[in-house]
Image: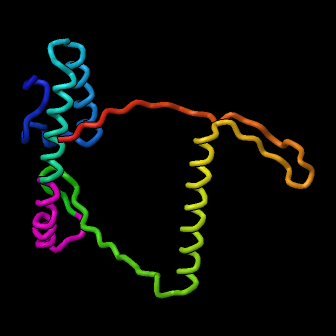
Amino acid sequence: MAKLVRQLGTIERQLKKRDIMELAADNAKAIIESGKYDLLKVYIELKRYETYLKGLIKHLKEPALERAGEKGEKSFEYDDASINISKRTKWDFSADTEWADLDEQIRQLSLKKKEREHYLRKHKKVTQVDEDTGEVKAEFKLPVEIKYGLTIRL
C-alpha cells in the first residue's frame, strides 16, 4: 500500500487541487480493487494521518502567515502554489438594540423549529386540521431518508 498512498513530500508540486483529488480517487480505487487490504484498518489509519495533518496545519498556520507577510504582497506564487493573504473583520452587532431584538427573534424561532422537529419525529404521521371548521386539510407521513456513516474515535 505504501506505493499507493503517498508519503509526505512525494506528491508532485505541479499538481493542482483537482489533480490531487483525482490521484486520491485512483489510489483509493486501486486499494479497494486489489483485495489485499483490510479496508477498515486502512480507513482507521488514514483517519489517524488526517488528525495528525490537521494538527500540523493548525500549529504551522500562524508562523506560515508571518512568513508570507514578510513578502510584503497580498498575492503571489510560491513553491508551485498561489498564495493570497486575506484580511477578515469580525463585527460585534450586539450593541445595537434592533439587531439584538432580531437576533432574539431568530433564536426563538430556531427553538420553535427544533420543538416542531421533535414533535414530527415522535409522531411520524401528521394531520393538519383547520382550526375554524375542524376539517382535515392535510395528512401525511413524514418522509425519512436513512444514511449510514462511520465514526472513528481515536
**Based on the displayed image, in which of its 4 quarters is residue 11 positioned?**
top left
Tell me what residue is drawn at x 68 percent, y 34 percent. 141
The vertical placement of 73 against 24, above or below, is below
Tell me what residue is drawn at x 26 percent, y 21 percent. 29
Quadrant into which the N terminus falls: top left
The vertical placement of 154 against 57, above or below, is above
In magenta segment, residue 101: no
Image position, residue 34 (x, y; %): 19, 12
In magenta segment, residue 69: yes
Quadrant into which the C terminus falls: top left
**Based on the displayed image, in which of its 4 quarters is residue 17 positioned?**
top left
Tell me what residue is drawn at x 58 percent, y 42 percent. 121
The vertical placement of 119 against 147, above or below, is below
Figure colour scheme: rainbow
Image position, residue 69 (x, y; %): 15, 71
Q: Is residue 79 left or right of residue 115?
A: left
Image position, residue 118 (x, y; %): 57, 48
Report the front residue among 14 and 126: 126
Report the front residue among 82 and 88: 88
Report the front residue among 40 and 116: 116
- The part of the chain drawn in magenta is 56-75
Q: Is residue 66 left or right of residue 128?
A: left
